[in-house]
Amino acid sequence: MKTPTIHRRRLCAALLGAGGLTLAALASGTLAGPARAADDVVVGVIQPLSGPNAQFGIGAQRGTELAAQMINAAGGIKALGGAKIKLVAADVPTPNTAAATTQRLISQNGVSAVVGAFVSSTTLAASEVTERAGIPLVTFAFADQITGRGYQYVFQVSPKGTAFGAAQFDYATAIAKAAGEKIDKIAILYEDTAYGTAQAKGLREAAQKAGVAVVLDEAYPLGITDVSPLVNKLRASGAQIAFPVSYLNDSLLIIRALRQQQIDIAVIGGAAGYIIPDFRKGLGAYAEGVLSVAAASGDLIPELAKTYKEKYGSFITHEAIIHAAALDAVAQAMEKAKSSDPQKVRDALATLDTCTGLAKGVPGGCITFDKTGLNTSAFPVMVQWRGEEPVTVYPPQAARQAPLWRGKPAP
């Protein structure tokens, strides 16, 4: 049974009337709201709500909240007599805390499923716990290993990291070619985490397939504070495009150093730190025109984007969109299973094939999981900073505006 379409006015009124949840409540591990009713269904949420990746975790949490409010405002889980979704959140600031925190969340709350976490390394650790417990975990995280280990209870809404890396290369070189520039040499810079290494692998393989030389292939540690050695190597490499794969602090350091040193090289971001509001806040005019691969974009689901901006005062991020779609997938699985039992929810997710509800915000417009738990309908998009927020510019079937290459239109 699929979630019915909700009339726009009714939905927006319900969402805006529901009120926001404070960051303090999120960080404490619980979500403010009415007392749990006997027929509520509980879904756990794990995100980095503090620490270096808090910007991403908070955005993801907000998307999950909006999805829960939408589902509940539309009548809850109808197959369960209108049961409401109750979110219970836990802060997982680092991969080291993920296993114990996820175990505690599951054992103390009787969850039907878990949504999260943004960080791939954290998700890998958490999924070991959910797999043993027989609890479905629906995630945004990119790393190939997430659905590459033969697990039965893990579902990945976004494409794999290697697919993002390949798209990062393919889309950028196609845009450059349309603008009249042939790319022969590239540089890959990536943090040495599960996310960074998976995406770099996709970049490397795509370049090899295209016969393009990788003249710099450099890993660096998470939390790097001095990018001068990387920038010096990049300057000397002769690369025409730099493909950095990094979280926020790394992205700010790399772009700022390149721009301040007037190094004339195209930079194509690897999602994460390149497409959140803090990127623009941290770089100002330096952010303008920066391209990045992304899992989703607000201009692909404008009604949700509008509601999010009215509620939180900033554009909706791709992690917010995908985690909203992840929770909606859980709700649709409950409708299909007519149950909140974790095993039955898992089985319904495994056969889910939906192009309704918040799945429309996922590029491709659908959620269909294969036998590994990967959403085979999803594909990455390329976004570009235009003023205060990024817009979708590639591939053509998803683009909302034409891309610019070195400040000029790419036909």
Image (cartoon, rainbow, N blue to C red):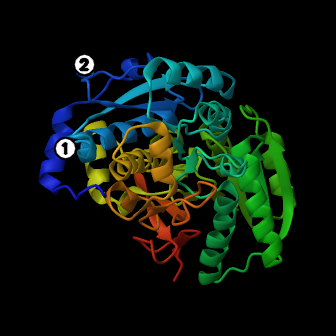
Residue located at (68% from left, 48% from top):
143
Q: Position of residue 242 (x, y in %)?
A: 72, 59
Residue located at (59% from left, 30% from top):
133
Q: Nearer the viewer, residue 34 or 381?
A: 34
Q: Secondary structure at mark 1?
A: loop
Amino acid type, label 2: Ala
- Left of 310 or right of it: where is 277? right
Res 35 label: 2
Q: Position of residue 45 (x, y in %)?
A: 46, 32
Report whether residue 88 is seen.
Answer: yes
Residue located at (31% from left, 37% from top):
312
Report whether residue 212 is seen.
Answer: no
Q: Residues within 10 Å of mark 1 (few under 14, many from 20)?
A: some
Q: Position of residue 313 (x, y in %)?
A: 30, 39
Q: Secondary structure at mark 2?
A: loop
Q: Residues within 10 Å of mark 2 (few under 14, many from 20)?
A: few
Question: How much space separates mark 2 and mark 1, taking CA atoms?
Answer: 18 Å
Amino acid type, label 1: Gly
Q: Earlier in the sequence, mark 2 or mark 1?
A: 2
Q: Which residue is mark 1?
A: 75
